[in-house]
Amino acid sequence: MFKKVLIANRGEIALRVQRTCKELGIATVCVYSEADRNSKYVKLADEAICIGPAEADQSYLNPVAVIAAAEVSEAEAIHPGYGFLSENADFAEKVEASGFVFIGPRPETIRVMGDKVEAKAKAKEVGLTMVPSFNIDREAKFEETAKAAAKLGYPMMVKAAAGGGGRGMRIIHTESMLRNSIGLLAQECERAFGDGTLYAEKLLSDARHVEVQILADAAGNVIHLGTRDCSVQRRHQKLIEEAPATNIPAKKLARIGEQSVEACRKVGYLGAGTIEYLYDGSSFYFIEMNTRIQVEHPVTEMVTGVDIVEQQLRIAAGEELAIRQRDVAFEGHALECRINAEDPVSFLPSPGTVTAYHPAGGYGVRVDSHAFVNCEIPHHYDSLVGKVIVHGATRPEAIRRMQRALGECVFTGIKTNIALHQRILENSSFRRESVGIDFMDSMK
Ligand code: ADP
């Protein structure tokens, strides 16, 4: 096992990774921007190195600064967390070329999966079912695109090959809308992601977002840790996640688990990863693969008892998976609410100083948060201030426990979306059964 690991991230995930490192006796080096100088994860790390100003492109997104910090601290491996450089294949390559272990898949896997057009082609090749789609060739005459669109049928979702985080996608209802949108969206994506490549996908209205957690080691052992349902979303960004996905026949669940494992085996996947699908009540359609730890990983940990960060570290250190598929058992139901520093009505970010903070506690409750009294929530980064995760014997019990836990949570000085979560938890459709990705639209 590694003696020292550098965590190239901030906030709750920097703390999350650090916690497992400590339990495994691994010394931790954290990097931070000037805006995060007084953060909890900085104070708790064995070593902390300032890598630049608040602006992410000059600190957390700067590969040179991160690798220099690894060199200075003599860390052996770099854990990228999620976001920032975690899905940057060039960074992973540089990390390895500099003599460190990148805690994640091989750079070429990240490269293929990071381009959604390439990822779809690969997923199709390894036997997964695709959402019907066509690639938009902007060099071709619009008539060609219109023809392909008519064949696919409206409404459709035009997406950026390089998109992520719910950005770079637009629902298109008509041919004239398609004509007017392509150029603008391509330009937007060129600016945001440095790549204006677009494709169109059939819009799967009110399908469910169901994903499969994968672990794969260097010896070729691949297992899955079951499913998560992340259908409660706002603007294509997840708000509440659950494990396991309910209301899906056991046979189908077993099949999608096996297919996901098989797909990862075929692409030579390494480490922890997630294959995301849209489920329309009968089939699972591949939408993308995330080649990193995900925000919602704790719900899987709660129902399987497997520490996914620990598995990432062990796999990166060259250990073989000690868990076989038959050892993976699922117990009860887990829910996670993402607590964002934002206005619960206008959704505008609400950065500032947390003046009082009381996390939830008690039986079956886990809070992953970097918050403390007087901590600063900077406006430079995303607004996640913590995650409340609960485990119950059943889904109704987990919902009741989450309502109780959120009722205990206090943040003052900043606004949070806790009230929005409470509204969702009270919603009869949400309580009765699994909801679709359009659920939040119908809640207004
Ligand atoms: P990102 O990489 O930005 O997270 P994804 O491809 O994972 O983008 O999609 C995010 C969300 O967007 C999905 O969970 C779903 O709600 C919605 N979405 C994506 N593709 C489709 C589609 N073809 N039809 C309907 N909704 C979709």
Image (cartoon, helix red, strand yellow):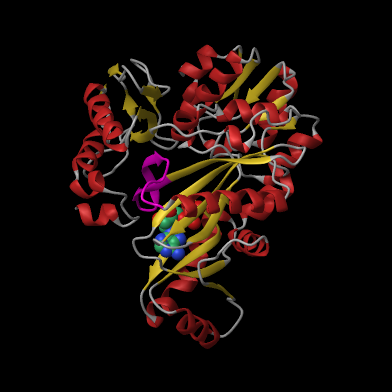
Q: Main secondary structure of the magenta part?
A: strand
x, y percent for residue 46:
61, 11
Q: Is residue 112 visible?
A: yes
Please indicate whether residue 314 sits to the left or right of residue 443 in the image.
right
Quadrant of the rendered image containing residue 50: top right
Identify the residue at horizontal 39%, vertical 45% (top origin). 238
Q: Which one is nearer the viewer's eye here, 92 or 326?
A: 326
Q: How many marks?
A: 0
Please indicate whether residue 193 sits to the left or right of residue 365 in the image.
right
Quadrant of the rendered image containing residue 377: top left
x, y percent for residue 344:
23, 40
In the figure, 46 relative to 421: above or below?
A: above
Q: Which one is nearer the viewer's eye here, 211 or 17?
A: 211
In the figure, 192 relative to 310: above or below?
A: below
Quadrant of the rendered image containing residue 282: bottom left
**In magenta segment, residue 157:** no
Q: Is residue 165 visible?
A: no
In the figure, 157 relative to 138: above or below?
A: above
**Magenta span covers which residues?**
229-248
x, y percent for residue 248:
40, 52
Identify the residue at horizontal 63%, vertical 64% (top origin). 124
In the figure, 282 relative to 301: above or below?
A: below
x, y percent for residue 414:
28, 28
